Amino acid sequence: MTSTKSKAAAISITSNTLLISMKLVAGLITGSVSLIAEAIHSTMDLAAAVIAFICVRISDKPVDKNHPYGHGKAENISGVIEGVLILIAAGIIVNESIHKIIEGTELKIVEVGIVIMAISIVVNVVVSRHLLKVAKATDSLALEADAAHLTTDVLTMSGVLIGLVAVKLTGIEIIDPIVAIMVALLIVKAGIQIIAKSFGGLMDTSLPESEKAAIEKCILEHSNQLVGFHELRTRKSGSQRQIDLHLVLHKTVSVEDAHKLCDHLEADIGNILPNAITNIHVEPCDSSCKQCIGKKDNQ
């Protein structure tokens, strides 16, 4: 799994490096602020991809003395940093675009920019789909954030491409910086979403309601063996789901049987939720359960 995630992150680094070079050259040739903006955006993408690559490798390190819960939150940190970089890129783009609107702009050889953007869109679509596929297979937040980043790029580059085509057809060059500002607004939205999702993991936000419901269903399937459960707590650290709960058993259940039931529950939860680590605290009933009351009635 580690090798798969690292290879995916490396592909993202390579593609972003290629796209930066292409967009920067095209921007300098044409004088297009939207192309320069995309080059800046891709530079942030490259930084984000490098961070994702490093954090993926860190998050997959095994548990050690100083990190008894593993290193999974490195992926959450990666997501927050990526989101911040996206917002910085948006600010730079808006600033450059406003200057161009005020000072005026002159585009040259727009066709070069159109070709470069078309190629860039195809590359990003292929890479982002691959990253998303690996992210889902490995439940990697860092790769998911990187894939979301590149998917947003496809939208922004499509906007730039449409803007360049419009300039070519109409000759109205102010369209270029206006499109760049619109691109920046889309980038801001993506950045905020990535930060919110990643920060939730750092704050130990509970697993989604659907996943908690699946855990509860799994426990209740063994209702004939237990009295009840409470204190169910969940959180996510990178791709690892951490679950703990208190399981109430009849006070006559042996330690061996209680241990077997806990092992069985942990395995069941692990089957429905990947990378789940479940800790169960066993408690005896307080003599008011149906079993105990039934025995009293029969005496």
Image (spheres, rainbow, N blue to C red):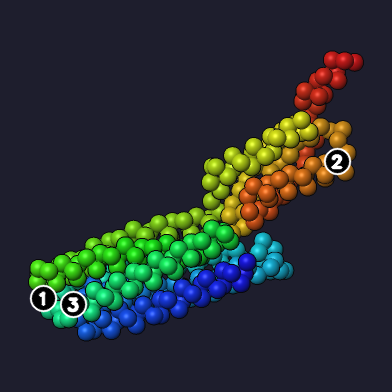
Amino acid under label 1?
A: Gly
Q: Residue furthest right?
A: 299
Residue bearing mark 3:
110
Image vertical order of residue 280 relative to residue 29, above or below: above
Image x and y of residue 30, in percent: 19, 81
Classify the position of the C terminus by image quarter. top right
Q: Quadrant of residue 72?
A: bottom right
Given residues 163 and 299, the one toward you in this image is 163
Q: Is residue 196 left or right of residue 120?
A: right
Residue type at mark 3: give it: Val
Q: Is residue 277 rendered to the left or right of residue 135?
A: right
Above or below, 284 relative to 292: below
The numbered dot on residue 257 is 2
Quarter of image, res 212: top right
- Distance Cα–Cα, label 1 vs label 3: 16 Å
Tag 1 residue: 104
CA distance separating discs 1 and 2 = 79 Å
Q: Are the residues tagged 1 and 3 within 8 Å (C-beta)?
A: no
Alpha carbon separation for disc pair 3 and 2? 75 Å
